[in-house]
Image (cartoon, rainbow, N blue to C red):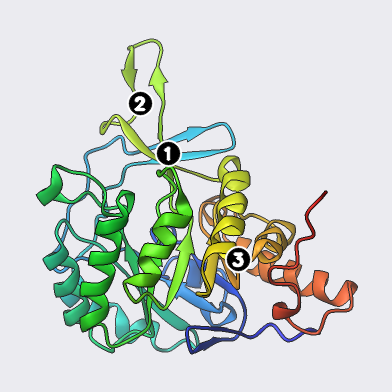
Amino acid sequence: MADLKVNIAGVEWSNPVTTGSGTFGFGREYAEYFDLSQLGAICLKALSAKPRLGNKSPRIAEVSGGMLNSVGLQNPGAEYFIENELPWLRQYDVKLIGNLCGSTIEDYVEVAEILGDKLDMFELNISCPNVKEGGMAFGTNAKMVEEITQKVKAVSKVPLIVKLSPNVTDITEMAKAAEAGGADALSLINTLLGMRIDIKTKRPVLNNNMGGLSGPCVKPVAVRMVYQVRQAVKLPIIGMGGIATGEDAIEFLLAGADAVSVGTAGIVDPYAWIKVKNGINDYLDQNGYNSVKDIVGKVELNG
């Protein structure tokens, strides 16, 4: 069996598979299916300084090859999480990543301070709308990416992952901005902005009109962006976007990801994470590789 351990910004995971924030909750439901210690890390449901109700329903819709969601980062708040969810999660031998969300830079700083060093890593969700900038997402402006990364990094007591939005013209510009701001690692891609219309009512299916597109349909875009970012920065990369099989994960690793995140696939199959992990191991064994790092960034371009 190959060595599946990976090191992300100084934090060692037992294997390269984590969960997509927002698709795994705080793990209680999936713990009924498998031992959560089998994961390399758990990226938790987004956490804000204060509880959030999220958007009104309908807020999830199926599309060909994926799904749209506009859940709106509903969560019970960081303090509730620390008191009621964290003690339960710590029974498992798995790294915990807190996904930070907010509407202002001050919101992000506050939730990072509340969580302190109680988790192993933070993931900065910069796809949130910045209310001080008219609702523009933090992650769509390079200057804003660098600023928010710098401010949160200044108070973060654990390694900081910046999650990049694909809804930009040049993903490498955002990656470089996050690196300049002091990010310890990057994760990409977050969901693509999408929309579905009910032709009978002539209205959008989602109450919020638009939502985040995820699932197999976004994988080619995600693989391309991971490859481009790998060429642009030296930070560890967690690749995500449509991963449902071990073969999918291998594509991301070859493109330059150091680890992978599975999200939407787990809603269809609760064992998706374990199947992806086993699939990575099988590929390494069958092709004579000793460890995950042996294939990271090893894509051979044509021409």
Q: CA distance from mark 1 to mark 3?
A: 21 Å
Q: Which residue is mark 2?
A: 205
Whether tag 1 and tag 2 are in contact, CB under 8 A, the answer is yes
Query: Where does the image place residue 149, in percent across and percent down from the top left?
Result: 28, 69
Q: Which mark is residue 158?
A: none
Q: Secondary structure at mark 3?
A: helix
Q: Amino acid at mark 2?
A: Val
Q: Is 33 on the left or on the right of 143, as rendered?
A: right
Q: Which residue is mark 3?
A: 273
Whether tag 1 and tag 3 are in contact, CB under 8 A, the answer is no
Q: Is residue 106 above or below residue 53?
A: below
Q: Secondary structure at mark 2?
A: loop
Q: Amino acid at mark 3?
A: Trp
Q: Amino acid at mark 1?
A: Leu
Q: Secondary structure at mark 1?
A: strand
* Crowd tier of the residue under label 1, counting other residues whose Cα lies within 10 Å: few below 14, some 14–19, many 20 or above: many
Could you say which is closer to the camera, residue 47 or residue 218? 218
Q: Residue at x 27, y 78 (%)?
A: 153
Q: Which residue is mark 1?
A: 68
Q: Residue at x 32, y 55 (%)?
A: 142
Res. 14 in view = yes
